[in-house]
Each structure stands twice: as C-alpha cells, then as structure tokens.
Amino acid sequence: MLMDTKYNPKLVEEGRYQKWLDAELFKAEDNDDKEPFTIVIPPPNVTGKLHIGHAWDTTLQDIITRMKRMQGYNTLYLPGMDHAGIATQAKVEAKLREEGISRHDIGRAKFLEHTMAWKEEYAETIRAQWAKMGLGLDYSRERFTLDEGLSDAVKRVFVDMYNKGLIYRGERIINWDPAARTALSDIEVVHEEVEGAFYHMNYPLTDGSGMIEIATTRPETMLGDTAVVVHPEDARYKKMIGKTVLLPILEREIPIIGDDYVDMDFGTGAMKVTPAHDPNDFEIGSRHDLPRINVMNEDGTMNDQAGKYAGLDRFDCRKQLVKDLEDSGVMVKIEKHVHQVGHSERSGAVVEPYLSTQWFVKMAPLAEQSLDNQKTDDRIDFVPPRFENTFNRWMEGIHDWCISRQLWWGHQIPAWYHKETGEVYVGETAPEDSDNWTQDEDVLDTWFSSALWPFSTLGWPDTEAADFKRFYPTNVLVTGYDIIFFWVARMIFQGLEFTERRPFNEVLIHGLVRAEDGRKMSKSLGNGVDPMDVIDQYGADALRYFLATGSTPGQDLRYSTEKVEANWNFINKIWNASRFSLMNIGDDFTVEDINLDGKKSVADKWILTRLNETIEEVTRLADKYEFGEVGRSLYNFIWDDFCDWYIEMSKIPMNGDDAEAKQMTRSVLAYTLDQIMRMMHPFMPFVTEAIWQNLPHEGESIVTASWPVVLPELTDAASKHEMEQLMEIIRAVRTSRSEVNTPMSKEIPMLIKANNEEHLNNIDANRHYLERFCNPSSLEIALSPDVPEKAMTTAVYGAEVILPLEGLIDMDKERERLNKELEKWQKELDRVNGKLANEKFVSKAPEKVINEEKEKQALYTERYNAVKERLEQLKA
C-alpha cells in the first residue's frame, strides 16, 4: 500500500485486525519446539462494555505477548469471559422487570435461557472491543466460566475439597444482601462512612436490684438478644453474673454471662448478645450455648420473632423501636456516631450480618500453604514487590470463605439432599436414584470458578491435556491492585492445591485509571471515559501508547485527553518521517539491498550506535515491565535522534552526487526504520504494521517479525562524541542567532576554536554539516583563530563557537550572558566535585558511575575555563 500524506488512524486500522485473524497470526502453536509463554486474560464480566481500566489492563498484556511472540516464544494470549453471577443476574432480572415479569414467573430453566442470550449479546460486544483495541488473542482457545470443561473443573474441585474436609456446610453469620437476597463474601462488601448513632439503653434486672446499661448502633437487633455479657473480672458486674435481665419491649428474660471477649474499658463494659445478627456475638453464643434468634426475613423486613414490629422494614423498625424505647423510659441517651457500614458491592444495599446455613471453604490450611510457598523456589514474584505484603497480610488474617449464593445464574452446587432422610450427597454427578434426591438450589460464588482460571482454561482436570502440559504454569498475570484479594489470592491457593504448582510466575500489578483531577471515575460523577470513543477520535495506537507509558507499575494513572493527543502527534511525526524515508529509499530498494558494511558518515555510525543502545535499553526495561521508561527511551530516540537529526542530515547525501553515500543512506534509513517499527509494534500494532508493509521486509506481517537485537559491529563509540560535538555546535549557533534576532536564512561569519588537533580534524571532516545547518558566510576552524572583540562565544565539547556579530551584539548584554553561563558551570562543578569528594559515594558507587562523574568534571572544567577566558578578553 502507498502511505497517505497524512496519518489517519481510521484508515490505518480499518480491516487490519481481521487480516491478522484470517492469517491466524495470534494462534499458539501445537508443538513443543519453542519455549512457551502464556498470559490468560482476566475474564471480563458479561454485564456490559469494557471500560478504560480494562483497556489499560489488556494493553499491558498485549504488549508483553506481542513482544514475546517476536522474541520467538510459542505465545498464548488466552481470551475468555466470566459469567459474573450476581451482577449478570441483577441485569437480566432488571430487564425482565421492565417486561413486567420476574424470574419466578418463568422458572429456573427459562431464566437461564434468557441469561445465556444476554451473555451471547454482550460477549459479541466485548469481542468487538478487543478487536478495536488490537488484542492479539488466540480465539481458538476462548473460554467462558460456564463452559462444559470449566464446569467439570469446578465440580472436581468442589468434590475434592469436600472430601478433604476443606469445604463444609454450616450455620454461620454471613454477609447478607437483602436486595439481591444472597450471601456475600467479606470482600464483596464495601465499607463506607455513615453518620449513625450509639443508642444507650437500660436493661432492668429481673430481681429489681437495678439496671445494666448497654449501647448499640443497631437497636432493631435487640429483639434477637439472648444474653448480656460482661467481663468475668469486672468488679462492677461480677456479682451480677448468673442473674437475668428483662429484655425491653419483648420482656423476655435473658441471662447475664461472663466472657473474656468483653473490653472492660470500652463503653459501659456490658454488651448485648445477639448470636443470629453479629459474628462476634455468634462466637460468644456458641461458647455459652445460647439460642440463636433470627428476627429478620431475607428481604430485610422483620419476621414474627420481632413481635409487633413484624413486617416492618429493618430501618422503619429502628425508628419505631427507638420511639417506643424513649416513651418507655428505657432509652438513656442517643449519641451521634460516624462509623463504617458495609454495603453490597453489587446492589448497594446495606449489608446485614445474618445467621444462615451456607457452604464455606476452610481457609486456614490453604492460606498456610500459600504463605509457605512464598518461601520456596516456586514462589510468585509480585511487581512491584510491595504488593506481596498486601497478599501476605490478607492471607494471614483470612476468614473462612462463604461460597454459596442464593442465585440461579452460576455453577449449581454439586450437592444433593435425600428427600426422606435429609442425607447429604456430594458428587460430580447426581446419585443413581436421582428421583429420591434434590439438588442444592444455590450456586457457587463467581470467584470460585474464576479462581481456577489459569488451569481450567487449559484443559484441567485432564492433566494430560496438551495445552495444560505445554502452557501451565502461566508466565505472568496482569491485573489491578484492587482485586489482589478477590482473584489473585484465590488463584494462588487453588493452583497450589490442585496442580501443586504456582499458577503464574509473576504478578504485574497496575493501579486504577483516575480522572484528570485524580478522582475515581464513576457513573455518579459522570467523569468516566469510554475507550472506544477515544479510539474513534485518536486511534487505538495513541490510546494504547498513553495507557502503557503514562505510569509506573503499581501506580494509578490519570487520564488526560491532552496526553492522548500528544501521542497522536508523536505517531504523526513517525508517519511523516517514514514517508520521507520511504521516498528516499525508493520503490526499487529491497531487503537484499540493505548493506551496512561499506563506508559510513559520522551520522550513519551515530544513528546505528544509538539504535543499538535503544534496542538494549528498551528490551531491558520491557523485561522489567517499566513501560513508562520504555516510552521515554523510544520517544527520545525516534523524535530527537532519528527525526530531528538523522533524517535532516540524510538529506545531504541524498541530494548529493555520491552514489555510494546515497546507497548507504538508503540502507541505514531502511534498517533503522525497520527496527523502530519492530520496537514500537507491541505498543502501536496498527500503524507499525501499515508502515512496515511499505518497507523492504521479509515475512507476512510485523506480528511475527523477529524482535530487534543488538549488533555489536554497528556500535561506534567515537561517533557519539563526534556527533554530540556537531549537534552542540549547531544548537549553539541557533541559540546565539535567536538571542540577537538573526534568522537562519541570513549568512553570518563563523569561527570555531578547537581545543586540540583531534577535535580540529573531527570538526573539519564534518564541516559540510555545519555549512548546511549553520548557514555561515565563511567558516574558519582553527586552534587559535583571531577572535574579534564584538562576537558571541559558546563553549561546547572540545571547542568554542565564535560568531562575529559586528553591529548585531550589545557587549554589555554579552558580558551579562557570559557571567550567567559562568555561574551555571560553577554550579555543575560544585555538584560533581562534591560527589567525588564524598568518601561514602566513592566507596559504594560502581566504577562506571564514578568514571562518568569524572568525565563530567573534566567537561565542566573545560567549559568553565573557556567562558572565563572569553570574559577576560572582553575586559581587556
């Protein structure tokens, strides 16, 4: 294809992804000749569109897998989606409500049909978004957490854990969502500060000997009180233990008991005990064999145990009960109190601690196994390392995991209850006499199946499955710090338990995408960003480059339209530079014509040296996932070195008569641009493919082209010094001209005073560059030129640039400028001298660093002396 005069992302990206898919360029190979590299996508929920956080997450994954594919690995980037139990069921139920029906009206089977249709619709949307992002996914291996194979894995895990005693069914206080009417795990509860109150009440002793004051933030639960507890050593209450009090309103007699749990110094030192509505009270009640009275229905209304308040919503009950307590004189006082209140992550309802019979995973042995594994060679490395502490802390303080959910959409629990005896049967299939058994209605927590994702997607529980043997353990998991608890930790303990290996070698943690002002993006604030809208405006490559290079591992990223636009401008610069290069390379130039063995100019040697340095640096930084630093390195090389300097300098031989120099310039342009495209490809897949297809290349696509490697024979250290000298001279001339308002189009005389013979020869050998870029009327390069009084001088590496500017220069201003420059070099000298005089620095710093500082010291001294000498001349 021919490159358009202007970069247009829509034209560049249109149809490109489908060509990659048609050629099966993202498909992992079914052989073991290459070393495997695997990333499984964190499966998005089939509840809607992907957001900007998904775009960031998947961009990082795609960069890593594209780079590994180019480095010769058998690369698998596995796609898939999560059924997202509560979230998806809530969406489908809302849709049904709009049609005037409920799931109960149509029954479980029909409801699941509706939900699966929803899933198919949104799965197509997600795939279209993946395509728009340019993700190199192997769709032949796409999985869904309710797939038959993954369902088999879930059943196997549940049954095995049950048989090992790691899964049990019991009555416990769980987090209950009254809106969704389902249990929640601890990490599905979002705690928010709410202004509430402490309600202080007097419970009268039944023997008439006095009162005992207690306080609560949830007075409606007092209707389920079965005791008052005090510390057994508390002198205030010691004699009361064994007595009873009369529960206000209901007038039920309940005992006063002693338990070490009570903090004597907190509040009144006496607590009400409501075993069915508080996890700590449940434990106290279990120790003292107290009854458990549940006073609420599943929807958050009060039940018959609540007496006259039955049928009221829990918060309406609170209001009425408080009024009744005040009217009866039981209420002592009400203190305003700001406290953390749990809300359902999905429905937003206030979570109720609720006594319920549920299925649980016993976490202590699994957590211990995970923590112990971090001390072995099979440990999982967190990037940045500080997030390992987050993981460890959560594992150390973990509670048993409530895994049953009162939903229809999900993996139905593989447990059956005998209709007559109530016997429990747990198995991967129903009992043989299935008519006599009823399967548990509940489904498993979504995270139960997604915890198996790294191995269930690869064919487990068939441990002989080709993909499981070839691609497990996976190499790196890329995810946000917000789901370390939800997902990362669970994958780790399930992977270790069922495969006896870590599920991934590394976890790369990124932060959240925030609004430009630093606030969290949310629907309520209206500050969210749709990545598809950004792509429509600026293209996928500009968005990807911003997401990849805008932050460091573990840190949040502030979205900035201005920065995305700046990346679009960067791509436009690359596009224009490529067009110019291709015009000079010519249509008839092939891969075979690239020959870098002949005579090279200093610019040729320098750009190839800088290319080697950039390849080495980019590869090293990318391997450490320092993509922000990769971006800076690529930007500096492409924009500054290649576009601003080499391309401009290449115009001299290309417009000259030296055929050999022209051919070398074509080779250097073609080779350098090819290597740039390869380095940029993981970040900007679309535009790099479009440009690469116009370059002399081998192979079908840049997707499968080899990653650049350093070629030592192309490094010429001396060329860096020569080129740096030339660039400094050219910059000095441009700056001086600007200061005295003399345009580059106006010829002026130019003198260069070289510090020694070597510098003199180097500058003289490259005088054609100075004549081209400085526009001198005359150019004298000497060791001791005659310097006119009225001239501007600038110290550069190995020389001084002298511009005789008779009639254009104010000598007082020139002296002022030189004095400022002298101050600058003095500061630099003070800094480097201080470093080298510091014994601690000299003894601990690597030799390379010390030598670099010594080189700076010599350079700064030379420049300081040159400026000082020129000032002395002007005083004479």
Image: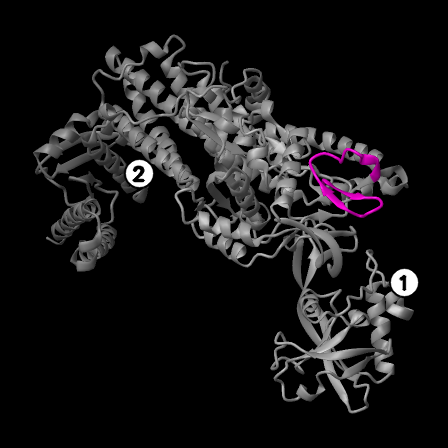
Image disc number at residue 742: 2
Of circles 2 and 1, the one toward us is: 1
Amino acid, disc 1: Gly
Residue in the picture at 74% in, 85% down: 212
Q: Which residues are magenta?
A: 414-436
- Asked if one can make out residue 126 in the rendered structure from this viewpoint, the answer is yes
Mark 1 neighbour density, 10 Å: few (under 14) some (14–19) many (20 or more): some
**x and y percentages locating residue 72 in the rendered image:** 41, 23
Residue 218 at what x, y percent from top left?
75, 70
Q: Is residue 536 visible?
A: no
- Of residue 268 and residue 494, the one placed in the foreground of this image is 494
The reply to whether callout 2 and callout 1 are in contact (CB within 8 Å) is: no
Asked which quadrant contains residue 142, the reply is top right
Residue 446 or residue 857, whichever sits in front: 446
Q: Residue 488: x, y in percent?
A: 55, 45
Mark 2 falls on what kind of element? loop
Task: Give the residue at mark 1.
Answer: 311
Magenta residue check for 418: yes
Whole-angstrom CA distance, mark 2 to mark 1, is: 89 Å
Q: Amino acid at mark 2?
A: Thr
Image side of residue 198 versus residue 58, left or right: right
Q: Secondary structure at mark 1?
A: loop
Image quarter of residue 665: top left
Q: Position of residue 601 (x, y in %)?
A: 22, 22
Mark 2 burial class by Cα count in 10 Å: few <14, some 14-19, many 20+: some
Q: Residue furthest front?
A: 421
Q: Is residue 406 left or right of residue 474?
A: right
Note whether 17 is above or below 384 in the view shown.
above
- Residue placed most toward the observer, 334 or 732: 334
531 in magenta: no
Identify the residue shown where x is 39% and y is 34%.
634
Residue 124 quadrant: top right
